[in-house]
């Protein structure tokens, strides 16, 4: 094969790959509409426990849907937006400045958590 044919083939493959990648990206970026109702299993909070606790606290209006508590999806999202952001977690600082060697020594200590032993 001559180099011109190889170059033309490489350009054709690169063009096809770019078109395929563009199609895949546009498919991923398509936004599916949010469901109308939120339940503990499917909700914008992402946690069934958080949904149930917020519903029990009266954060948004709920109703029974069979055996499940449900709420309008928009109401749950509106409540989420109205909440203040969580405080950032900070690690407790030791007294004084630690050197890198001291920090590595602390990090290398074995965990004090008890592990379950399966029988």
Image (cartoon, grey):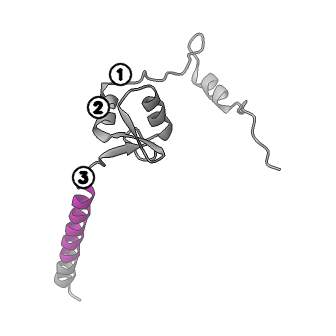
Crowd class of label 1 (few under 14; some 14 to 19; many from 20; radius 10 Å): few
Q: Which residues are magenta?
A: 11-33
Question: Is residue 92 shown left or right of residue 29?
Answer: right
Query: Element type at marker 1?
Result: loop
Crowd class of label 3 (few under 14; some 14 to 19; many from 20; radius 10 Å): few
Question: Looking at the picture, does residue 57 appear above or below residue 45?
Answer: above
User: At x 20% / y 80%, what residue is drawn?
Assistant: 9
Question: Is residue 66 shown left or right of residue 13?
Answer: right
Q: Quadrant of the N terminus?
A: bottom left
User: At x 62% / y 29%, what residue is drawn?
Assistant: 104
Give the labeled residue for mark 1. 84
Crowd class of label 2 (few under 14; some 14 to 19; many from 20; radius 10 Å): few
Q: Earlier in the sequence, mark 2 or mark 1?
A: 2
Q: Disc 2 versus disc 1: distance between alpha carbons?
A: 12 Å
Q: Residue furthest bottom?
A: 1
Residues at badges 2 and 1 in contact (C-beta under 8 Å)? no
Question: Looking at the picture, does residue 36 appear above or below residue 80?
Answer: below
Q: Earlier in the sequence, mark 3 or mark 1?
A: 3
Spot occupied by residue 40 in the image (x, y as percentages of width and height):
45, 42
Give the labeled residue for mark 3. 31
Question: Is residue 4 shown left or right of residue 75?
Answer: left
Spot occupied by residue 62 in the image (x, y as percentages of width and height):
38, 35
Question: Looking at the picture, does residue 49 appear above or below residue 4?
Answer: above
Q: Is residue 19 magenta?
A: yes
User: At x 63% / y 22%, what residue is drawn?
Assistant: 102
User: At x 60% / y 24%, what residue is drawn?
Assistant: 103
Q: Is label 3 or label 2 in front?
A: 2
Give the labeled residue for mark 2. 78
Q: Main secondary structure of the magenta part?
A: helix
**Front position in the image: 47 or 24:** 47
């Amino acid at each position: 094969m001559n180099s011109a044919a190889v170059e033309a083939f490489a350009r054709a493959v690169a063009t096809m790959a770019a078109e395929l990648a563009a199609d895949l990206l546009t498919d991923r970026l398509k936004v599916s509409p949010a469901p109308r109702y939120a339940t503990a299993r499917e909700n914008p909070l992402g946690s069934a426990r958080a949904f149930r606790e917020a519903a029990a606290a009266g954060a948004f209006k709920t109703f029974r849907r069979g055996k499940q508590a449900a709420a309008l999806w928009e109401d749950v999202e509106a409540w989420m937006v109205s909440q203040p952001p969580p405080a950032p977690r900070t690690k407790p600082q030791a007294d004084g400045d630690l050197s890198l060697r001291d920090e590595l020594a602390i990090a290398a200590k074995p965990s004090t958590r008890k592990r379950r032993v399966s029988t």
